[in-house]
Image (cartoon, helix red, strand yellow):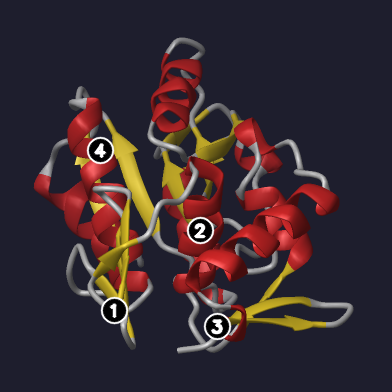
Amino acid sequence: MHLLLIEDDLDLGPALQAALKVEGLSSEWRRRAADAPPRLDDAQFDCVLLDLSLPDGSGFDLLRRWRHAGGQTPVIVITARSALDDRLAGLDGGADDFVVKPFATAELISRIRAVLRRSARQASDSWTLGDLVIEPRRHRVQLAGQAVALSQREFQVLLELAREPGAVVAKSSLAQRLAPLGDPMDFAAIEVHMSNLRRKIGAERIRTVRGVGYLLES
């Protein structure tokens, strides 16, 4: 999963990126509103962590602009503002969650996963696709009741496909989401992981859409 972090604090930014990386989440860090993408859904981020007080503008304005443009990418506001009016303004403005600084990293990670589950229409910690069951938090996969041994990278590939079952996931999007700190992964490496996944969960479950990407049969 690939996140966008918009935060101007020079200490907090790298610390959050390091914490996300430990959890298997890649991220891009930007410090100014001007560096934010004009449209979220075009930028291929799975979630945004947005500070409200930026050097060149307000996070509220960014959030309103994104939602006005029709963007559905989940946004979690992270801010030192704790007033009720600020929390309500953030949620009413389209934020999916609101976390007040200082916060425990474990809580933020938990909230990120909860928001991503909701956005993927997965209401629990177990994602069920026919006889394939994926448990993201436990890094476990079962097929017809039997455990499937996957490498960490194979698990991440499967998780990205499972977030959009029945929809084509572009190879370029996978390369970005699976990369540490946002550096795109080599397409050849993705193909190797896909081959290993097909061997372990069944070749018929993952379909290649030539010239576009991959589709996990739901």
Which residue is disc 4 drawn over? 108
Relative image position of residue 202 (x, y in whole percent): 54, 77
Pointer 3 or 2: first along the chain: 2
With respect to residue 187, does 161 lie above or below? Answer: below
Tag 4 secondary structure:
helix
Q: Residues within 10 Å of mark 1 (few under 14, many from 20)?
A: few
Position of 9 relative to 218 (above/below): above
- Measured Cα–Cα span from mark 4 to mark 2: 15 Å
Residue 199 at what x, y percent from top left? 59, 67
Q: Which of marks 3 and 4 precedes in the sequence?
A: 4
Kind of residue at disc 1:
Ala
Judging by the rendered image, the residue that carries numbered circle 1 is 144
User: Does residue 95 appear in this view?
Assistant: no
The label on residue 46 is: 2
Residue 205's tag is 3
Amino acid type at circle 4 is Leu
Which residue is drawn at the image coordinates 46% and 21% (left, top)?
18
Crowding around mark 4 (Cα neighbors within 10 Å: few <14, some 14 to 19, many 20+) is: many
Q: Nearer the viewer, residue 70 or 25?
A: 25
Q: Is residue 73 left or right of residue 108?
A: right
CB atoms of marks 4 and 3 within 8 Å: no
Q: Tell me if label 1 and label 3 are in contact, CB under 8 Å.
A: no
Q: Earlier in the sequence, mark 4 or mark 2?
A: 2
Q: Quadrant of residue 83?
A: top left
Number of other residues with Cα within 10 Å of mark 3, as a class: few under 14, some 14 to 19, many 20 or more: few
- The location of residue 40, given as percent across then percent down, is 60, 62
